[in-house]
Amino acid sequence: MTEPVNTEIARYYYVARTVHVERQSEYRPGWLFYSRTRADFDEDLAIRTPGVKRASAWAVGRFVVRHGVRVLEMPEPLAVPVWPHAVIVHSRVLVHNILRPRSARIRIVTYAIENLSPEAKFRGRLPLPGWAARAIVSLFGGFLLRTTDRVVFGTQAALDTYLEALPSAMKRPGLETELVWALPMRGNDLGTEVRPPTVVFLGTFEERKGIHHLLRAWPRIVSVLPDARLILMGKAGDIDVVREFARTRPEVTLLEDPPRARIFEVLRESKSLVLFSQPTPVWKEQVGLPILEALSQGCEIVSSDETGIADWLAEAGHQVVAQGADDEELAEAILRSLRSQRTPAEIVAGLPVEDTRKTADDAMFAA
């Protein structure tokens, strides 16, 4: 592993995915630490990228206080599953800062998109009374937020969630906050022709991502539009169900765990992306990376109202369906997206010229 150009910046994501490593070349240079990986993680890319290192939370805390890191990005304070690891790092930095002059202190910054009540998330995991769940959230979430210097929110829903869950910590003097909507950079040279009726699903093949709803809705879609095609891209989850569905339907193509280049190639040729996310007691779609990637490539989006950018999608002319809607309602929304006469160029016209996650990164590490 080679050192990054700038060793005063560090990021700790705990659970890393390929896109985090890819962004190393676009963001301000610095260290990237992670403890676990998602199913899509590219180990070879991580090895080739300067400054990327697998480490425990304890090792990250020790590293940043010993190697001159000045600004550290941490997982957001309401990332409940990460609390045991985040508390370790925050505590180590807090002790360091107490013992050092202000000019030598480490700033902790974070990007926040959590839009599910932490109390509800906690009670979904443990049979706790409401007062106990609120006390735990206040103790751990409050500590992490109070030891954070700057928060950049990716959605209004996330900002509202923090104001409701940790009102006193959010009002702490000295806490810097900013809202930068989580939107992708518009793609280039996407064409001015309406694309053929190809639908794409991208993600893990699990219930919470809405794959079963899509498979049940598909016969209705193809009965109305016989030339419609469906491309399923992903892995894991109920892969056997997806394989059987694709095997029995000639208009359906399954691409298991395709490389990133192939994913974007398919998105650039598809009319609509469907990500009909469904909540669980401990999870709610924060934004949905497939939505952002498909938007950037000029696709119509069919989403549930669970995503944190649901209001933006609806205002931009995409199809937002209530998460409790039945399969027929989903099918009708998909049909509307396929019948849309918007071109890819028209779809991306309302997107920013820079990926706002990069904008958020710049805001976090601004002096």
Image (tube, helix red, strand yellow):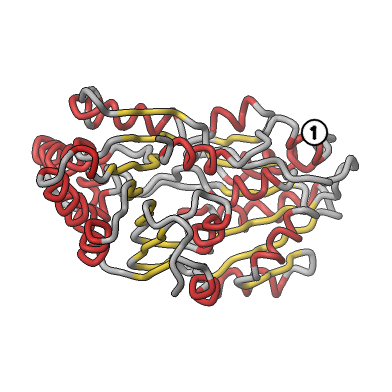
**Residue on which the image places disc 1:** 346
| Quadrant where the N terminus is found in the figure | bottom left
- The three-letter amino acid code for the residue at tag 1 is Glu
Residue under the image location 39 percent in, 57 percent down: 7
Q: Is mark 1 on a helix, strand or loop?
A: helix
Say if residue 271 shows up in the picture.
yes
Residue under the image location 71 percent in, 58 percent down: 264
Residue under the image location 20 percent in, 25 percent down: 172
Question: From the viewer's perspective, is residue 188 above or below residue 175?
Answer: below
Residue reaching furthest right?
193
Give the image location of residue 227, x and y in percent. Answer: 86, 55
Of the pair 187 and 209, the residue shown nearer to us: 187
Drawn side of residue 216 relative to residue 350, left or right? left
Give the image location of residue 162, x and y in percent. Answer: 30, 31
Label 1, residues with CA under 10 Å away: few <14, some 14-19, many ≥20: some
| Quadrant where the C terminus is found in the figure | top left
Drawn side of residue 23 relative to residue 52, left or right? right
Of the pair 83 and 358, the residue shown nearer to us: 358
Residue under the image location 63 percent in, 25 percent down: 315
Drawn side of residue 243 relative to residue 189, left or right? left
Give the image location of residue 242, x and y in percent. Answer: 60, 69
How many numbered dots are placed on residues in this image? 1
Say if residue 281 shows up in the picture.
no
Of the pair 310 and 229, the residue shown nearer to us: 310
Give the image location of residue 119, x and y in percent. Answer: 22, 39
Drawn side of residue 259 relative to residue 198, left or right? left
